[in-house]
């Protein structure tokens, strides 16, 4: 109920100022002081502070932000601080906070005399003059630090004292974004630096290329990447159907190219209840391009829980730091790129698709609806090569599983799976005289499947707790790429009478 408390205090100060008007000179001075204090306190109808959402400076650590207990109760946003988290232990919540030494200077009389106590009292010791840089109730927002690779958003619950390293040891507990963003507003989309993404190949033959502003790297075969893009090339053999000729050996080859951006918004201006925000959004958006081919006769696939087995080929991780005003917000991004083939083991194909588009997945919060999912995708595909033999069905996907969260929590998980699908049919007819015909048709489709869920850890925004995962909802789109028909006839081998 921080907002209600702040408004009640404001009303009390204003009434006190009015009651003292017209009294003695000393009372008038008190009234002026009260009026000044009221003027410094933001009014309930004041325009909320708009914070810019930008990428934290690269090549150096982002500044730490500190929200004092008084500021948090007043609904004010945190301020930039010289504090640094020197060490942190997640299990115990213990942290060591380093800061420039702050010395408490005793107040001096306006006209000191030789007999004044300040002139005769001994100087206080160093332990008495050095103040702790934080107090119980303060909230710290920090970029990745020793022991906190995912950043730190924590409230001080106890000040233990000086540490042997020269810092201050404290005990902390997890905090919420509302405690450092207060009643401010923040909104923006920040590109993820492709050079900061760690890529771990999971199969042989994976190649990684990236491009960023001012430092362009070329991809395989001289491919020039758009700035801000990451490209992963892969080629691998897959299980071939039993009895298939050597010429029908199955393989998948292609690349995924993406330019991810973190979408973040927060609205703490008066629509919520207590200290909770009135609105929020966290998601992943960006451009997607992929090109891949499926060749040969893939073996009939087995399934797990009714789904075809998938083969991951690269794991990606990044911890980009964005800033909402002075507050560093650590975003944890994980992606697993995979290919998946669902086949019946009867059709031989040589198909290739070029696909481009964009996507947006995440969760949005409002007090009228709570947390609701966002899943959008606009993609188009173009066939580059089509050759289908025999009958059967096969579907090949080249996709990515993604998760995005804040300060080491997972808030949104999503599975984006563009695919190629081939279906082929054939009908044979014959008669007793040896004549007959075979007719067949095939069709090639492109499509995209998008699914996922909102996780309970989204409550890090300071929103009400929900007890279960909220599905994003299945998004399924499919479009025709190519189709064809063929007919063949046979004549009787019996000589004419």
Image (cartoon, helix red, strand yellow):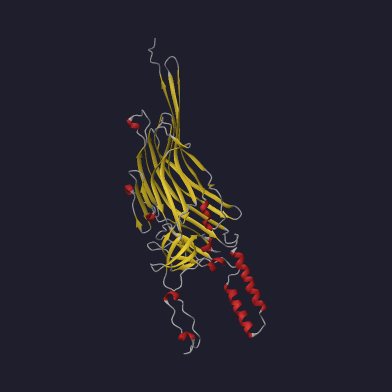
Residue 109 x/y as whole percent: 50, 85
Which quadrant, please, contains the C terminus? top left
Which quadrant, please, contains the N terminus? bottom right
Relative to 497, residue 124 above or below = below
Residue at 37% of width from left, 29% of height from top? 242
**Hey, which residue is sitting farthest bottom in the picture?**
114
Relative to 166, residue 216 above or below = above
- Number of dots carrying numbers: 0
**Hey, which residue is sitting farthest top in the picture?**
497
Mark yes or no: residue 458 visible: yes
Residue 83 x/y as whole percent: 43, 67
Residue 288 x/y as whole percent: 43, 48
Residue 358 x/y as whole percent: 47, 49
The image quarter in which residue 168 lies: bottom left
Residue at 50% of width from left, 54% of height from top? 282
Q: Please tell me which residue lies in front, 473 or 246.
A: 473
Q: Please tell me which residue lies in front, 122 or 310.
A: 122
Relative to 308, residue 163 above or below = below
Relative to 461, residue 241 above or below = above
Mark yes or no: residue 45 visible: no
């Amino acid at each position: 109920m921080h907002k209600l408390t702040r408004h009640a205090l404001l009303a009390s100060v204003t009434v006190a100022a009015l009651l003292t008007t017209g009294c003695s000179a000393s009372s008038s001075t008190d009234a002026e002081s009260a009026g000044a204090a009221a003027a410094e306190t933001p009014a309930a109808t004041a325009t909320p502070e708009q914070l810019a959402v930008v990428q934290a400076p690269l090549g150096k650590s982002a500044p730490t932000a500190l929200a004092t207990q008084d500021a948090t109760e007043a609904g004010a946003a945190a301020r930039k601080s010289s504090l640094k988290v020197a060490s942190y232990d997640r299990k115990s919540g213990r942290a060591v906070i380093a800061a420039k030494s702050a010395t408490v200077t005793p107040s001096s009389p306006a006209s000191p005399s030789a007999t004044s106590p300040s002139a005769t009292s001994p100087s206080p010791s160093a332990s008495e003059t050095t103040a702790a840089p934080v107090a119980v109730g303060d909230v710290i927002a920090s970029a990745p630090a020793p022991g906190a690779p995912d950043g730190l958003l924590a409230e001080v619950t106890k000040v233990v004292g000086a540490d042997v390293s020269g810092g201050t040891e404290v005990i902390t507990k997890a905090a919420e974004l509302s405690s450092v963003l207060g009643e401010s507003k923040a909104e923006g989309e920040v590109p993820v630096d492709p050079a900061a993404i760690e890529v771990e190949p999971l199969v042989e033959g994976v190649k990684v290329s990236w491009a960023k502003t001012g430092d362009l790297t070329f991809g395989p075969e001289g491919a020039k990447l758009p700035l801000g893009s990451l490209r992963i090339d892969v080629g691998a053999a897959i299980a071939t159907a039993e009895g298939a000729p050597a010429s029908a050996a199955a393989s998948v080859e292609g690349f995924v190219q993406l330019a991810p951006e973190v979408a973040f918004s927060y609205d703490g201006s008066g629509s919520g209840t207590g200290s909770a925000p009135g609105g929020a959004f966290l998601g992943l958006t960006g451009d997607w391009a992929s090109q891949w081919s499926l060749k040969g006769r893939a073996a009939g696939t087995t399934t797990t829980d009714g789904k075809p087995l998938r083969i991951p080929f690269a794991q990606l991780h990044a911890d980009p730091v964005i800033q909402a005003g002075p507050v560093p917000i650590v975003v944890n991004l994980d992606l697993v790129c995979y290919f998946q083939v669902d086949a019946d083991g009867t059709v031989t194909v040589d198909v290739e698709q070029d696909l481009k588009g964009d996507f947006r997945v995440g969760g949005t919060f409002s007090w009228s609806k709570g947390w609701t999912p966002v899943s959008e995708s606009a993609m188009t595909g173009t066939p580059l090569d089509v050759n289908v033999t025999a009958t059967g069905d096969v579907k090949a996907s080249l996709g990515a599983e993604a998760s995005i969260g804040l300060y080491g929590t997972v808030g949104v998980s999503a599975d984006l799976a563009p695919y190629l699908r081939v279906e082929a049919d054939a009908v044979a007819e014959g008669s007793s005289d040896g004549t007959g015909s075979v007719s067949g048709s095939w069709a090639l489709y492109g499509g995209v499947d998008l699914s996922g869920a909102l996780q309970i850890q989204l409550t890090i925004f300071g929103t009400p707790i929900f007890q279960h995962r909220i599905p994003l909802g299945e998004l399924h789109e499919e479009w025709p790429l190519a189709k064809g028909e063929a007919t063949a006839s046979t004549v009787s081998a019996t000589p004419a009478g």
